[in-house]
Image (cartoon, grey):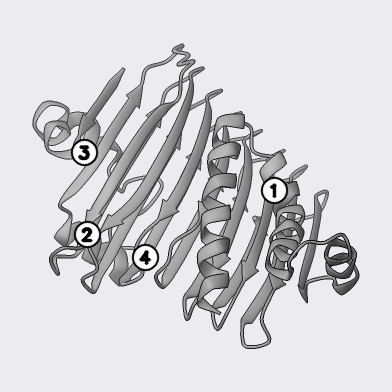
Amino acid sequence: MIICDWQTALEQHSDLVQKYFMQKAVKYDEDLLTAQHVANLTSGLFVYVPKNTVVKEPLTTYFVQDATTKADYVHHVIIVTEKNSEFSYLENLTTVGSEKTTANIIVEVIAGVDSHVKFASVDRLGTNTTTYLNRRGHLEDNAKIDWSMGMMNDGNIVGDFDSDLVGNGSHSEVKVVAISTGKQVQGIDTRVTNIGRHTIGHILQHGVILSRSTLTFNGIGHIIKGAKGSDAQQESRVLMLSTKAKGDANPILLIDDNDVTAGHAASVGRVNQEQLYYLMSRGLPKKVAERLVIRGFLGPVLAAIPSKKIEEQLKVTIERKLVDGQTDE
């Protein structure tokens, strides 16, 4: 197994880097953002799991963006799992400093035949960091990726989370929790493309909006012609706690073949006033009551996260974000 920083990977494992770096999951010439990423890349991580290798303990990483200067943060992660391997990964993104900067972060997960990857992240980038965050999976025959992502950033962000189910029988479960506060703007595109036969792609994303912030969920399920027997399902829900906030949940299904199943659910709404009234009638202050309602709203996504440790970490982060967000109002 190989775990190393970007410079070491280039020096000692150049053959693997050349084989996988922006070749399968994300193409370097896909758009201007990916081209800019390649041109200015400064840091990263390379993880390689050989075939028939089962890693029981998750690899936990902490990446800290230095915003004490105005230098942009351009970061790349590659995770490769070979045939019949299993691997769990927890990524933490944070910011130190308050200078106005941009971040361009790309994560590529290449899941080989019969491999299983559990990818979890807790993102807490700073208020003055404008971010493009692209996480994408390339799945071969019978591979599976479980994505669990907590979008707890304080700055503006565009999130692009994609899974390409290239191999027959491949499977992707995508779970996203997002909270927007202050004047923050978050746009999150979550896409699963069923290319191989009998592939499964499920999207579950819940978000909460406070103050004057904006949150948009785009859920995209695309079944390519030839992907017979495939399944594409998605659910996107947004809870608004302010009359000045803006929220949107857009379900998109693109079905190019027969003998498939697909479905979607989407909603944008306000806090249930009856629930608030009940909790406040039991002596709870309004802000505490609102946080309890929000916890219940996010509960289905958190409960579906495969790791209890990650679930608990997200709960703590969500509580901090909600407290800070209510203070801003």
**Residue at (73%, 66%) from the top-left corner?**
285
Q: Which residue is mark 3?
A: 18
Q: Nearer the viewer, residue 297 or 161?
A: 297
Residue type at the position of mark 3: Gln
- Spot occupied by residue 97 in the image (x, y as percentages of width and height): 22, 62
Q: Is residue 47 left or right of residue 84?
A: left
Residue type at the position of mark 2: Tyr
Q: Which residue is mark 1?
A: 301
Q: Nearer the viewer, residue 85 or 322?
A: 322
**Residue at (75%, 48%) from the top-left corner?**
300
Which residue is at the far left? 11
Badge 4 marks a residue whose secondary structure is strand
- Spot occupied by residue 140 in the image (x, y as percentages of width and height): 52, 34
Ranked by sequence position, the earlier of labels 1 and 2 is 2
The mark lying in front, picked from 4 and 1, is 1
Q: Which residue is mark 4?
A: 132
Which residue is at the far bottom? 244
Ranked by sequence position, the earlier of labels 3 and 1 is 3
Residue type at the position of mark 1: Val
